[in-house]
Image (spheres, grey):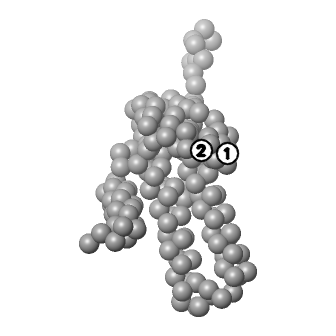
Amino acid sequence: MDNPYAAPASTTPVPDPRASYTPTPFSLDGRIGRLRYLVYGFLPALVLLIVLAFLIGQFGLGQRRGLVQLLALGTALAALAIALAMTRRRLHDLARPGWWALLMLAPPLNLLLIGYLLYRAGDGGGNRYGPPPSGNTTLVAAGMWGILMLGVTLIAAQFEIG
C-alpha cells in the first residue's frame, strides 16, 4: 500500500558526476580537451591541404588558375567549418557558450582565443554541456606527434636544414 505522506520519488536517473565519455572526431556536441582540440581541429585541415596539393599536381591543374582557386576556396571553407565545430566543443569543455567560436573569424581575436583554448584546462567535473572527456588515446597522441613532425619538417624545408 502506498503511503500518501511519503516524499515523491523521481524516475529520472541521477548522472554520476565522475562519469566521462570518449569524444569522437565527427561529433558536433560534447566536450574535448586541449590535445584533442589540436588533433581533431587541425589534422583534418592539413589532410585537406595535402589532398588539394596532390590533386593539383596529379592532374596538372597549375595552368587552370580559376579551377585551382575554386578548389582552394572549397578546401578553406571545409577546414574553417571543422575548426569552428572543434572550437565550439573546446569552449563547451571550458563551460563557455559555443557562439564564442565566431571570434575565430576576427583576425586579431582568433589568436587570443586559440591561446586561451590551448592554455586553460577544462572543467574537471561535468558541466551543462556534458560529462568531461576521457583521457587521450594512443591514436590522439600519435596524431599530435604527426602534427609536430610535420611542423619540424616544414621548418627544416624552409631553411634547407639537413
Q: Nearer the viewer, residue 1 or 101?
A: 101
Q: Which mark is residue 110?
A: 2
Q: Quadrant of residue 134?
A: top left
| Residue at the spot 60% in from the left edge and 52% down from the top edge | 85
| Residue at the spot 49% in from the left edge and 40% down from the top edge | 115
Q: Quadrant of residue 11?
A: top right
Q: Nearer the viewer, residue 157 or 113?
A: 157
Residue with the mark numbered 1: 106
| Callout 2–callout 1 Cβ contact below 8 Å | yes
| Residue at the spot 57% in from the left edge and 47% down from the top edge | 87
Question: Circle 2 sits in a helix, a strand or a loop, which is it?
Answer: helix
Q: Nearer the viewer, residue 96 or 46?
A: 46
Query: Residue 51's x, y, as percent?
Result: 53, 77
Q: Nearer the viewer, residue 86 or 80?
A: 80
Query: Residue 39's x, y, as percent?
Result: 44, 56
| Residue at the spot 63% in from the left edge and 35% down from the top edge | 97
Can the viewer see residue 126?
yes
Tell which residue pokes out farthest to the bottom in this image: 59
